[in-house]
Amino acid sequence: MIDIVIGVIATFGALFVLFAAIGLVRMPDTYLRISVTTKAATLGVGLVLMASTVYFSNADVTSQAFVIILFLFLTAPVSAHLIGRASYFIGVKLWDKSVMDDLRGKYQKNTHVLKSVVDDTPEDNVDHTKMEDK
Amino acid sequence: MTLFEYLHYIILPVLVISAVLILWRFIKGPSIADKIVSLDLLITTGIGVIAVYSIIYNQSTLMDTALILALIAFLSTVALSYYLEKRKRK
């Protein structure tokens, strides 16, 4: 009975990791790929760690697995925000069919300051219309 | 089919297939941010593989390695994005 529970939880975890990998390959844009990475893979790895917790079912492994899960849940949004910000500054191009860019003209290129209104100095803005080879 | 056979023949190949897909994006990735993201996801998949191996071999000490890998993944992503943002632009 406990084997079935472990198998089901591990199956869901592996499926979520697989969906994250497929999304990373199929998504058309760097920002969408970051979004895939920070949600689906974190949930999948958390479920696999839960499966090992159910298998061992003692306090040592349970506390250790919950430390790992808590660490992943805390650090995934932080790292996703950092890499998204950095890729916006180095001018990674958005998807062609993107409807709008809320940050257009608000992140300043030289000072790295986020303004709340659109600035009218176009030489200080990040240009996303062309992607440089970086 | 026992639990260990199921983990060996179903769960681990699925994780390995996803690791291969992520590695393909790591090699192909058009920008350097894609490579950093796929590296982070590759290490996260490695944590899952280590957790499955700790069930198969009944070794709970393998979870220490998973904790260290989670730390390294976060630190590498933060450091790489920091230097990516700070480096001189042309």
Image (tube, coloured by chain):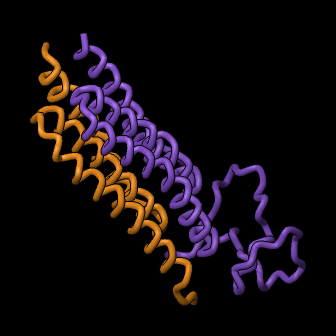
Give the answer, above or below, for where A115 lies relative to B16: below
The percent coordinates of residue B42 (x first, y second) are: 33, 53
Residue at coordinates 87% horizontally, 71% vertically from top-left? A118
Residue at coordinates 19% horizontally, 27% vertically from top-left? B7
For this orientation, the residue located farthest to the front is A59
Residue at coordinates 63% horizontally, 74% vertically from top-left? A89
For this orientation, the residue located farthest to the top is A1
Residue B16 visible from this viewpoint:
no
Residue at coordinates 71% horizontally, 51% vertically from top-left? A98
Give A47 or A99, whichever is nearer the viewer. A47
**Which tint is chain B?**
orange
Give the answer, above or below, for where B75 lies relative to B54: below
The percent coordinates of residue B14 (x first, y second) are: 27, 33
**Which tint is chain A?**
purple
For this orientation, the residue located farthest to the left is B57
Say whether residue A87 is left or right of residue B79: right
The percent coordinates of residue A112 (x first, y second) are: 69, 80
